[in-house]
Image (spheres, grey):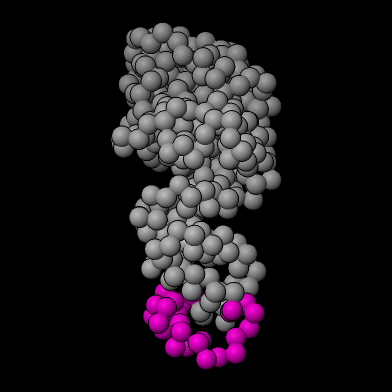
Amino acid sequence: MISQNSSKSRKTPSLSKKLQIPSKCSPVMSSSESVAVVCKYITKGWKGVQEAYGDKENSEGVQEVLAYLEAVEKAKLCTDEQELILLIEEQRLEKEQLLTNHLKSKEVWKALLKEMPMAVLLKHLGKLTANKLLAAGSADVAAVCERIQDETALKKAKTHLFNILLASENYKRGHGKRSKLKWEPDRDIVQALDCAFSKSISIVEPTGKRFLVAVDVSSSLSSVTQGSSISTVAVAAAICLVIAQTEPDTQIVVFSEGSVLPCAVSSDMTFMQVAAQLIQTPGGSTDCALPITWASENDKTVDVFIIFTNNQTFESENPADTLKTYRQKSGVFSKLIVCGLIANSLSIADPEDRGMLDICGFDSQAVDVMRNFALDVI
């Protein structure tokens, strides 16, 4: 499973995020003086900062922050491309500090690309390819591929495995979800993204729990996941692969129309191979109690059941009741996580039972919640 990032996602970035203070300034930001400069800028603007610090003898740390903020202000008024590029390179400015007109320049984007944060790079791979900034076989493509596959860089940027998957699937699609932007996916970039996804799995810490992951194939897995822009089969395949590679005691099954079939997912398989394993002929009705019944009938000891479904139909028995019966038989306080990948609401888990959890849709935060739930952190 995937390590937690406890901070909740927000649609509106914080003021500190908007400022984008570069990493080279981070050591001095612990200084109360440096923090005071930033606070002054937030509350009083650049004019207030100049009035407060312009005639003072400032420490080296404060001078660095002042130089950065001055570059931010100059960028707002800059009309000279070369001057703007110099500001970007000297102070590591990011696209958030630039005007919309600035971002129409390929040379400006090239300057931004050199120090572009990993999350921003992954998000804009399609745009960079569409605008020919990442031309096939170019040195820029080689440099980007090297960064994407750099395990140290991925760790440093705290790049979430699910966000790499999202970037990869979006890039392979060749067009934006809402915009008219289109691009021809570069083969080297696609391979680099696949490699990055595999490497990100290798740094996941196991929970030591016994898992049974069940994927409902009674309906098509080509639907788009709620809260994301990728297919339900991509989400299910990714989680199956992560758990299979990180948790030694894992069973993967698919279920549909009254039957449960073991799915041969091994630790040496690729994402695409796992996805192919999960794609079965859809049909029949959904019974989310089936995987739990199957585990009971086959004497499987399970700490955590994870069920991926597009539906919540009960055929024979409520999964919550089936889990309680399984607990009594096995003597294990097994947990149940049901992920309704295209659902806006879900009502399978017993709200009075601390060992059951419903999740509607899916994103990186859902992965963290699942891990913490399995570990009794929440």
- In this view, 194 is above or below 368: above
Residue 51 location in percent, x, y? 44, 88
Q: Is 7 or 197 nearer to us in this picture?
A: 197
Q: At which x and y percent is residue 373?
A: 53, 41
Is 285 part of what is drawn in magenta?
no
Describe residue 194's horizontal placement relative to residue 120 as left or right. Answer: right
Write the residue at 42% across / 30% down: 183
| In front of the other: 185 or 122 | 185
Instruction: Look at the image and tell me whether residue 163 can be seen.
Output: no
The residue positioned 65% from the left and 34% from the top of the image is 199
- Please state, as top left, top right, bottom left or bottom right, where the N terminus lies in the image: top right
- Compared with 309, 209 (above or below) is below
Q: Is residue 89 left or right of residue 181?
A: right
Specify whether 302 is left or right of 367: right
Residue range in magenta is 38-63
Do we see residue 266 in this rendering? yes
Main SS class of the magenta portion in the image: helix
Image location (x, y in percent) of residue 35: 54, 76
Q: Residue at x 49, y 64 (%)?
A: 83
Residue 50 position (above or below residue 233): below
Front-lying residue, 104 or 321: 104
**Above or below for 190 versus 280:** below
Query: For residue 358, which quarter of the picture?
Result: top left
Label count reads: 0
Determine which quarter of the picture holds residue 302: top right
Which x, y percent locates residue 76? 39, 66
Residue 61: say if magenta.
yes
> Which residue: 56% across, 14% down?
263
